[in-house]
């Protein structure tokens, strides 16, 4: 149970010092290519990604501390893969509690369990649980290693002026206000986004008339790392309860309270402790001693801005969209927003793409937000039925689920975060050839175990560099010519890393100049991509598939790269 | 239209009797629960999305039409 972290940093108490910037003493506003507003998980991930792609970035935060309370705790596989690329995935994994299994209970019986990662051959688990302050702390430490990031604490944006090719921000500091000019501004400033308000924008959607209590309790309990969800449990009748394990012996318990609950009353420890004690009395943890770590009463809404881009300002994370917490789709989708935005801002900064590429950010991530909102709204409607007939069908489903497998597919305690496949994105090149499997144009690249050339076992996703397109070329007759063609086709369009996939035990294939070989040790890479010999899969810098061919030709590859950069 | 609305029962009267019989001695709330379960069981049996949507639309249209006629 104890986690072997070295010198434990108390991220909740860490104060990041305000430092005066030279920009506060310039005559006119200092000009920067990108200013990111908000140093939460989304803003930090974006700033790190930009810096790794050689884009200097100013990151502003109105506070000098990390997340107060554990808040977001479930970080999904895709988010961990992004953190790996950003260089801080290992720290998250080492501290986090990994889990794949969920159990669903109705009244006092277990209805069923589900495994979110039923197949092997992935480096990362379906989820880790980790308090948001650790995630922010590890990201902040990574950001501090990158000289291209200028992180300014206690810098609050109070005004914005939009111009044709830049925006001017007014920023308040302990030393008073100053002005700052940016070619692009990323608004990662959370659900109460100051930038959204300053631009007169709103998110639209549905609010839910229900209240939930989060109680994080610290206790020693030998219990599996699983997500446990109860509908109508005997210890909390007519409502739902969710239990999750976090690092440091902290357990997250979510109690549905109903709309009439008084948040001020429910937040009092003398009211929370008996709820927890009643719950524990119904489990194997009944004698556990616990102390209350953090509590919060919340309501939620599923909503988004109509457009994630307004002039020079791009919205990412909670500033752009909000979901109910069932499904862990808030912070996870925000980090995916950041990844989508980072390579596009970098391509524009380096002169490889124009405004049309940035224009694709909105539609791609708005569609992803719609998918997250749809899933989270459906889960919320199931968990908290709002009409008599909705409750009737909900309970009928749960009662049938005990005996009938089909009904378990309808039970919805949260459809947990998976990355959106960008179906229909203008950056995708539609298939002309036939392919099997899930890795269609727009899909995020699946991981697979491989062996690199010196015989070391490794993972596919670790071979895909930040800021570069990657070509997965499945070895076959003519591969050498295709590899040379690819390097020539990419030419001055964009950086392209060519990876040749060779099968285990294939007779020694001669090395190709500028090409890295990946040995498909277990055959999973070939299987997941339907990679018949000669197949080429083109991946964007954010690891989404953008084109694939059975017999690639130079003109088609060039056209696909240009399309992926919105160069038409 | 994939939803069959022409006669399709093997034995219509037998089914109807069995349906009413299934509700015998049940208070209204349990009858509602039974109906809901019946809908879910049959919906899974049908499976086909379009057929299910047509059935939902037909049931709703019939209900709204009946209510409009009553109100008139």
Image (spheres, coloured by chain):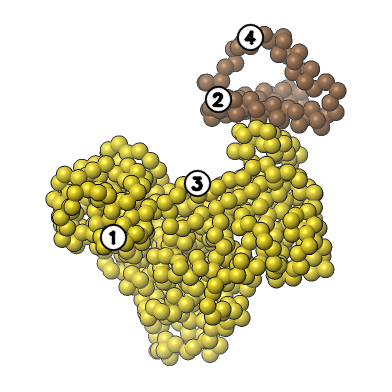
Chain colours: A yellow, B brown
What residue appears at the point 53 percent right and 90 percent down from the top-left corner?
Answer: A175
The answer to whether marks 1 and 4 mark residues whose Cβ atoms lie closer than 8 Å is no
Name the quadrant containing residue B56: top right
| Above/below status of B66 relative to A533 | above
For the residues labelled 3 and 4, the Cα–Cα distance comes to: 43 Å
What percent of the width, then of the height, locates residue A252? 67, 62
The answer to whether marks 1 and 3 mark residues whose Cβ atoms lie closer than 8 Å is no
Residue, disc 4: B10
Name the quadrant containing residue A459: bottom left
What percent of the width, then of the height, locates residue A113? 61, 45
Instruction: For mark 1, name the chain.
Output: A
Task: Please state which of the two labelled residues, at mark 3 or mark 2, is closer to the viewer.
Answer: 3
| Above/below status of A350 relative to A515 | below
Residue, disc 3: A118
Is the residue marked by circle 3 packed among few (<14), some (14-19), or many (20+) residues within 10 Å? few
Task: Please state which of the two labelled residues, at mark 3 or mark 4, is closer to the viewer.
Answer: 3
Residue, disc 2: B51
Task: Please state which of the two labelled residues, at mark 4 or mark 2, is closer to the viewer.
Answer: 4
Residue, disc 1: A455
Q: Name the N-terminal-most of marks 4 and 2.
A: 4
Instruction: For mark 4, name the chain.
Output: B
**Which of the pair A484/A155 is nearer the observer?**
A484
Is the residue marked by circle 1 packed among few (<14), some (14-19), or many (20+) residues within 10 Å? few
The quarter of the picture where the N terminus of chain A appears is bottom right
Q: Secondary structure at mark 1?
A: loop
């Amino acid at each position: 149970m104890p986690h072997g972290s070295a010198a434990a940093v108390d991220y909740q108490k860490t104060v990041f010092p305000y430092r005066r910037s030279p920009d506060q003493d310039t005559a006119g506003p200092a000009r920067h290519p990108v200013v990111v507003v908000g140093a939460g998980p989304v803003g930090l991930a974006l700033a790190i990604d930009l810096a790794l792609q050689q884009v200097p970035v100013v990151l502003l935060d109105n506070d000098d501390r990390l997340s107060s309370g554990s808040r977001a705790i479930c970080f999904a596989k895709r988010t961990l893969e992004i953190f790996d690329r950003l260089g801080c995935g290992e720290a998250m994994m080492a501290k986090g509690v990994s889990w794949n299994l969920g159990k669903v209970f109705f009244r006092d019986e277990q209805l069923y369990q589900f495994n979110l990662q039923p197949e092997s051959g992935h480096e990362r688990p379906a989820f880790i649980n980790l308090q948001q302050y650790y995630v922010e702390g590890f990201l902040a430490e990574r950001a501090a290693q990158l000289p291209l990031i200028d992180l300014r604490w206690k810098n609050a944006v109070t005004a914005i002026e939009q111009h044709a090719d830049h925006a001017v921000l007014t920023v308040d500091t302990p030393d008073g206000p100053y002005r700052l000019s940016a070619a692009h501004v990323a608004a990662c400033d959370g659900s109460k986004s100051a930038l959204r308000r300053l631009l007169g924008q709103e998110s639209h959607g549905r609010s839910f008339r229900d209240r939930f209590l989060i109680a994080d309790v610290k206790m020693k309990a030998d219990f599996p790392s699983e997500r446990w969800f109860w509908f109508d449990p005997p210890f909390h009748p007519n409502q739902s309860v969710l239990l999750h394990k976090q690092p440091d012996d902290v357990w997250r318990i979510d109690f549905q309270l109903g709309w009439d609950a008084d948040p001020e009353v429910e937040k009092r420890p003398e009211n929370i402790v008996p709820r927890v004690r009643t719950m524990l009395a119904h489990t194997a943890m009944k004698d556990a001693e616990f102390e209350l770590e953090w509590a919060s009463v919340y309501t939620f809404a599923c909503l988004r801005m109509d457009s994630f881009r307004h002039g020079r300002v791009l919205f990412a994370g909670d500033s752009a969209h909000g979901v109910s917490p069932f499904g862990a789709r808030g912070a996870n989708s925000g980090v995916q927003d950041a990844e989508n935005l980072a390579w596009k801002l970098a391509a524009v900064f380096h002169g490889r793409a124009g405004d049309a590429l940035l224009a694709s950010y909105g539609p791609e991530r708005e569609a992803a937000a719609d998918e997250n909102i749809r899933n989270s709204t459906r889960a919320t409607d199931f968990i908290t039925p709002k009409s008599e007939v909705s409750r009737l069908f909900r309970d009928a489903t749960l009662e049938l689920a005990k005996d009938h497998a089909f009904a378990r597919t309808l039970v919805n305690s949260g459809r947990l975060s998976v990355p959106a496949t960008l179906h229909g994105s203008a950056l995708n090149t539609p298939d002309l050839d036939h392919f099997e499997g899930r890795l269609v144009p727009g899909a995020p690249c699946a991981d697979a175990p491989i062996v690199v050339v010196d015989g070391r076992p490794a993972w596919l996703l670790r071979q895909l560099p930040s800021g570069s397109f990657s070509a997965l070329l499945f070895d076959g007759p003519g591969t050498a010519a295709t590899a040379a063609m690819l390097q020539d086709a990419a030419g001055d369009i964009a950086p392209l890393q060519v990876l040749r996939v060779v099968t285990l035990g294939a007779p020694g294939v001669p090395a190709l100049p500028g090409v890295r070989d990946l040995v498909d040790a277990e055959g999973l890479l070939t299987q997941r991509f339907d990679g018949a010999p000669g197949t080429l899969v083109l991946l964007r810098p954010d690891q989404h598939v953008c084109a694939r061919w059975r017999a690639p030709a130079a003109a088609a590859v060039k056209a696909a790269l240009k399309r992926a950069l919105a160069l038409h | 239209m994939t939803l069959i609305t022409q006669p399709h029962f093997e034995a219509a009267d037998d089914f109807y009797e069995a349906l009413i019989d299934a509700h015998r001695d049940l208070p209204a709330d349990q009858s509602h629960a039974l109906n809901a379960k019946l809908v879910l069981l049959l919906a899974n049996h049908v499976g086909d999305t379009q057929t299910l949507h047509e059935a939902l639309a037909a049931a709703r249209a019939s209900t709204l039409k009946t209510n409009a006629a009553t109100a008139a």
